Amino acid sequence: MGIFFSMFYMAISLSQIITGPISDRFGRNIFMIVGLLVAAGGIAFAPFLGLPLVLLVFTVASLGMGVFYLASMGVLNEIVPDYLKGTISGAYYLFWGIGMFFGPPIINQIAICAGFQTSMAGYSFLILLVAVGLITGKRCQPEIT
């Protein structure tokens, strides 16, 4: 778990540089979905690999998480009016940080109790559910006044 989240922090910088301009041009929804699918696939596949390859797969999964992160932050900033952009960014970082702080110990505890493959399969399934929700759901834009 520590390796995955360390790779995530390194990969997020790279994904921001690459994904930012492209998602500005082609739209954010597709990047949110593709990022989640890449992350879910990598996380689900990782338990079946040995140490050298698992690092590569975790790096790719981390790139997927970084792509989702950047695109979803862009969506939030498009939805809210200018006077709430700082507030929504701060709230996003707060909840993202909570997930990054508590996520690894929770997943690690699940891995201790149920096994590494089970914990990675569960984590991947949750990410996949979000991707399916984005694919099938209608993007709502609430009126904020």
Image: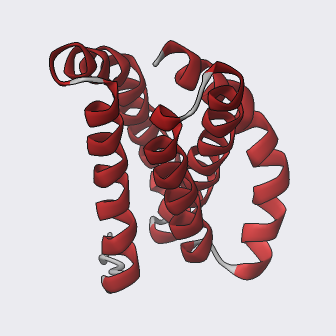
Residue 122: % across, % down: 26, 43
| 33 over 95 or under it: above or below | below
| 117 over 20 or under it: above or below | above
Q: Is residue 54 left or right of residue 128?
A: right
Residue 110: % across, % down: 21, 22
Q: Residue at x 30, y 82 (%)?
A: 137
Position of the C terminus by quadrant: bottom left
Q: Nearer the viewer, residue 110 or 48?
A: 48
Q: Residue at x 33, y 25 (%)?
A: 116
Residue 73: % across, % down: 54, 53
Q: Nearer the viewer, residue 27 or 1?
A: 1
Residue 100: % across, % down: 42, 25
Q: Residue at x 63, y 20 (%)?
A: 51
Position of the N terminus by quadrant: top left
Q: Nearer the viewer, residue 135 or 70?
A: 135
Q: Residue at x 32, y 80 (%)?
A: 140
Q: Nearer the viewer, residue 115 or 134?
A: 115
